[in-house]
Image (cartoon, grey):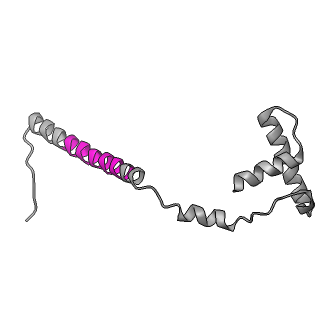
Amino acid sequence: MLLTLEINGFSDAFIMSIIAIAIVFVILELIVLTINLTSYLTSKFPKSDESQNAVYDTVKEESFSMENIKDDDMMAAALVATIEYHNEIKKDVNLSEVIDKLVQKIK
């Protein structure tokens, strides 16, 4: 049996439109509540530090120096990092200072 609605005039069409709009707003409100609940739960239960510790464990504790730069690409990357660091702090910097800062960021 097929459900059919009989619309007899403007008032019935207006009521059907209001019901349809209300259904859309209810569905949108459910979506908003679901998103808010998931963001609340993710902030309430943060990720474990095991994944972050795994990254830090792979970094060796040895220091990085100019002798570790083996090819032109590494030298270019170090020079670009020096220029960026100089632009950031607006002071004169040495390449060794930049290398030390990069190693500290990795740790």
Q: Nearer the viewer, residue 92 or 30?
A: 92
Single out the residue that lies furthest toward the top.
90
Q: Is 52 or 30 nearer to us in this picture? A: 52
In the rendered image, the quadrant that contains the C terminus is bottom right
Residue 60 at x, y = what percent? Answer: 74, 66
- Quarter of the image with the N terminus in it: bottom left
Is 100 or 79 nearer to us in this picture?
A: 100
In the displayed structure, 90 sits above or below 38; it is above
Q: In the visual, does 43 lie left or right of 88?
A: left
99 and 79: which is toward the camera: 99
Name which quarter of the figure residue 25 lies in: top left
Q: How many marks?
A: 0
> What is the span of residues highlighted in magenta in the rendered image?
20-39
Main SS category, magenta section: helix
Q: Is residue 12 left or right of residue 23?
A: left
The residue drawn where x is 90% and y is 55% is 75
| Residue at position x 80%, y 41% in the image | 85
Q: Residue at x 59, y 63 (%)?
A: 53
Q: Is residue 12 above or below residue 46?
A: above
Q: Residue at x 16, y 42 (%)?
A: 19
At which x and y percent is residue 31? 31, 49
Question: For residue 18, which quarter of the picture?
Answer: top left
Q: x and y percent of residue 72 in the render?
A: 92, 59
Left or right of residue 16: residue 30 = right
Residue 70 painted magenta: no
